[in-house]
Image (tube, grey):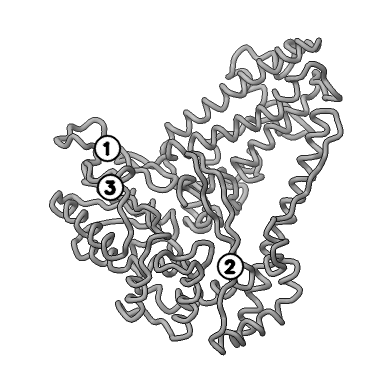
Amino acid sequence: MDLETKLENIIRQESEKLILRYHAYHNNLYHEHKRNEKRFGEKLEKKIEKPIYWSENQLFNPFYTRKKAKSIAKSVIKNINNKTYSPNKPHIKKIPKESGGFRKVTIYQIHDAAVSKLFYNSLLYKNKHRFSSFSYAYRNDRNVHFAIQDIWVDISENSRTFIAEFDFSDFFGSISHDYLKKQYDKNGFIISDEEKFIIDKFLDVDKNDKGIPQGTSISLFLANMVCWNLDKNLEKEGLKFARYADDTVIWSLDYEKICNSFTIITDFSTGAGVKINAKKSKGISLLTSKELPAELSNKTYNIDFLGYSISVDNVSIKDSSKKRIQKQISYLLYKNLIKPLKTKKLKSIIIPNRIKDESLLIAIMQIRRYLYGGLSDIYLLNYIQGKTKRINFKGIMSFYPLVNNEAQLKELDGWLLSTFYRVLKLRAKLLHSHGHHVSTFFPFNSKDKYELLEQCKKKKVFKKNLLRIPSFILIFKALQKGILEHGIENTMNPESNKYNYESRKR
C-alpha cells in the first residue's frame, strides 16, 4: 500500500472516530435533556454545541475531512515529497484542573493528526524493540496495567524495598530540541530522512528550541526516544523501575544503588533540559509493611503510581481516584433523587408509590452503568459462576482490573450502601415536606441499610432484578475471573492507555 493510500485511510479513521464521538455526545445530550424535562416537570432549552475550532478551519471538521479524504491525502503527500509540508497551527483548548489553573490540550487539524499517526506507526514498528522493557507508555506491546503488575509482583516478594520517586516539571514542554535531535543517529534507532523531516516540522510548530508538541502521535515516540539513555542507565545500575512517559518509580533492595538513581535522574535532567520538580518529588524512601520497624525516617507504606496505590500487601485504587469515583456516584444520586425535590413547588415529578420509584431505578441504572459499563448484576454473577463464557468490561472499574485489596472494595460497598440509605431517608423527608408520605413502603421503610440491601435484591421491575444495589466486590470478582481466563489485555478497558489516571497531569 502506497503512502498516499495509507494516509487517506488514516484520515478516514480519524474522521470516523471524531464523528462517532460527536454522535455519542449528541445522543447523550438528547436523552439527558428528556430525563431532565421529566425530572423537573418543565420545558428546558436544549443547546447543541459544536467544537469551536470547527469554525476556525474546515480541516478541523471530521465531516468535511471524511468527505475529502482522498484529495487531502494527495495534496499532503505531494507537499511531503516536495519538502514543503508543515503542520498548521493547532487549536489550544484550556481545561480547568481540580488543583487550580488550566491544563492545555493541543488539537491539530485532522490531516496533520493523520500525518503524525502515519509516521508514528512507522517509527514504532521499526524501533519498539529498542525501548526498555520497563518503559510502558505509548506502545502496542505494553500498557499501564503491565507496569502495575510488574511493580506489584516485584515488591510483594520482599517485606522491605528502597523506593525512589521523582517528578519532572513540564516534561513535554521542556525537552531540549538539541538533545532530542542528537538521539536520531544514536542507540540503534532507525529513522529515515523523511521521518526526520516530519519530526522537525512538528517540533518547529511553536517556533521554540524546546518542547515536543502534545496532542499528536509522533510526540509519543519522541518521549520514549528522549528517555532511552535514562532507561538504559537505570538498567546498567541494576535498578528495577517502571516508567510511563515521565511518571517513574524506581526500586531496589540495595540502598547504594537506589542512591545512585538520583545521580542518573539528575544527569538526564541536565542533558534533556527537564527540571526535577522538588516539591512533588518524594525522593528516596523505605517501602515496608506497617507491622515492621523501619530505620529510615522517610518511610512509606505504599507507592502511588498512576491511578493505583501499591503496597507490600496489595494493590488498591489510589485515594484521589477513589474519591473521584465516590464523587461521581454521589452526584448521580443527588441529581436523580434529591435535586428535583429541592424546590418550593413540585412540577410534574413522578411521585414514588408502593409499586415503583422511577427515579430510584434511573439512579441505580446510571451507577451500575458507571461501575460496570452497562452490565447487570445478574450477568456478572452468571459470568462468575461460569454460566456466561465471555464478557466485555467497559465501566470505570475496568480501568482498575489489577486491584486486589478486597478490604478497600468492601469498604466502598459499605460506603455505597450507607450513602443509598441516607439519600433515601432524605428523599422521604423532602417528599413528606411536599405532602407525600412514603415512609411506610419500599424502599423508604427499611429499618437499616442491610434491610434495604435485601429488599433491593428481591424487588422485581419488569420481572428483572433491576434494583439491586451495585457492588465493587462483584465487579472485582468478575474482573479477576476475566484476567485469569483471558489475560489483562482482554479484560482491561480498551481505552486504558488513553484514560487520564492522573488528572493533575498536563
Residue at label 1?
A: 300
Residue type at numbered disc 2? Lys
- 317 and 244: which is toward the camera: 244
Question: To which quarter of the image does residue 192 belong?
Answer: bottom left
Q: Secondary structure at mark 3?
A: helix
Sequence-wise, the earlier of marks 2 and 3 is: 2
Looking at the image, residue 213 lies above or below residue 496 = below
Packing grade of label 3 (10 A; few <14, some 14-19, many >=20) is many
Residue 140, percent across and down?
47, 67
- The Cα–Cα distance between marks 2 and 3, rounded to whole angstroms, is 46 Å
Q: Are marks 3 and 1 in contact (CB under 8 Å)?
A: no
Residue type at numbered disc 3? Ile
Mark nearer the viewer, 1 or 2? 2
Sequence-wise, the earlier of marks 3 and 1 is: 3
Whether residue 84 can be seen here: yes
- 39 and 495: which is toward the camera: 39
Sequence-wise, the earlier of marks 1 and 2 is: 2
Residue at label 2?
A: 89
Mark nearer the viewer, 3 or 1? 1
Q: Secondary structure at mark 1?
A: strand
Number of marks present in the image shown: 3
Q: Quadrant of the N terminus?
A: bottom right
As drawn, the residue found furthest toward the front would be 207
Residue 427, percent across and down?
70, 18
Question: To which quarter of the image does residue 257 belong?
Answer: bottom left
Q: Is residue 43 left or right of residue 370?
A: right
Packing grade of label 2 (10 A; few <14, some 14-19, many >=20) is few
Residue 484, percent across and down?
46, 52
Residue type at numbered disc 1? Thr
Residue at label 3?
A: 155
Q: Residue at x 53, y 29 (%)?
A: 413
Looking at the image, residue 272 lies above or below residue 423 = below
